[in-house]
Amino acid sequence: MALDRITLSTFRNHVGTQLDGARQLNLLVGENGAGKTNVLEALSLFAPGRGMRRAALADMASHLGKGGFAASVTLDIGDGGEPVKLGTGMAPERPGRRIVQVNGAEATAISLGEWLAMGWLTPAMDRLFADSAGARRRYMDRLAVALEPAHARNASRYEAAHRERNKLLSDEREPDPTWLDSIEAQMAEVGAALAQGRARLVGALSHRLAELPEAPFARPLLSYDPGGELTCEALASQLRGGRARDRAAQRTLSGPHRDELGVVMAGKHMPAAECSTGEQKAMLVAITLAHAELAARGRPGVLLLDEVAAHLDPLRREALFDRLRASGTQVWLTGTERAPFDAILDEAATWRVTGGTVERL
């Protein structure tokens, strides 16, 4: 068990919700629009980043909260250690600014990655392989953070330096070479670390996926193309040599922000984007499960699965539940009815969600 005593206050349609007695497997059941996914979204805020919906903070606050919201959890860190109280939210008087606390002390959102290894799979991710390269880079980085918390800081610092360089390149005035040198040095340092983290992630996932049978979930073959050497020196040289071209384009045309995650279905040797919707879903499930197993080897792991079982046949559902039991991570699942989860009802903590209220079953 990782999380317990989950409290939501004026978060979306949850005015005041508390979930106690969580187990390794946890199930939220209710009609569409009842607020099941809202609970998962609140839990996803205990990872670095913008949560599973990438929504603005203001959109998460209920109109009953006067523009603010709060979420808190108790984290069991195991090994007899004292539970840790994590909190996040937004105060009405500080709109747009996220508040994070660890045991009552103010902290940063990036620091949450040091406490939890968080992952999720949602219906919106079904189009990942047909989406933009940027969406797949964000996906890689989110998975990498769950394995290496420092990756979040590298991604944040690179993004800030990248914005600053683009700002200089697009200015009417000729950029100061000394200032460009400084920014490019930072981009090269954190960019190399960022690319190396992505490469380690893809390598670890590929190794784990290769150990698994192709059935019942389609096995994906992963590749990462960083577009050059993964060293600080190589990236610095690339940026310096591309100044004239980048100045003409008014943006940076090389670097980790241009990288791509390649996915091919092993059984057909077909790019994931060309596979059927069902095959793409099966590959996403395979990646999600392999990642959860890797993440659980370090910090406490939490996996959020929104409406995943309803789209699987009985054989794949049984395989999914077996893998989740063995993963060592805490799992939160949602569904509109209990029937698809019959195989785990005896062991799962189950709640019914109705109009933003939660009742233990």
Image (spheres, rainbow, N blue to C red):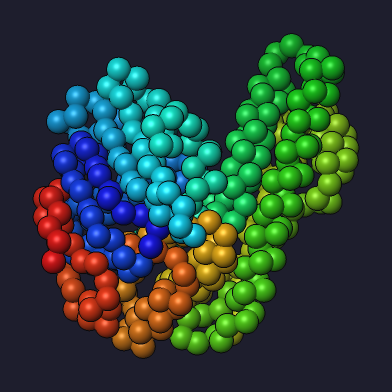
Residue 38: % across, % down: 26, 49
| Residue placed most toward the observer, 53 or 97 | 97
| Residue placed most toward the observer, 108 or 317 | 108
Q: Is residue 14 above or below residue 144?
A: above
Q: Is residue 140 left or right of residue 95?
A: right
Residue at (51%, 80%) from the top-left corner? 218
Residue at (43%, 37%) from the top-left corner? 102
Residue at (66%, 40%) from the top-left corner? 154
Residue at (74%, 34%) from the top-left corner? 187
Q: Is residue 217 left or right of residue 9?
A: right
Residue 270 makes an appearance in the image: no
Q: Residue 359 lies in what quarter of the image?
A: bottom left
In the picture, the quarter occupied by the C terminus is: bottom left
Q: Residue 29 lies in what quarter of the image?
A: bottom left
Q: In the rendered picture of this protein, how many numbered marks are placed on residues? A: 0
| Residue placed most toward the observer, 43 or 192 | 43
Q: Is residue 274 above or below residue 242?
A: below
Residue 136: % across, % down: 56, 54
In the picture, the quarter occupied by the N terminus is: bottom left
Residue 110: % across, % down: 53, 38
Q: Residue 36 lies in what quarter of the image?
A: bottom left
Residue 2: % across, % down: 40, 58
Q: Residue furthest top?
A: 173
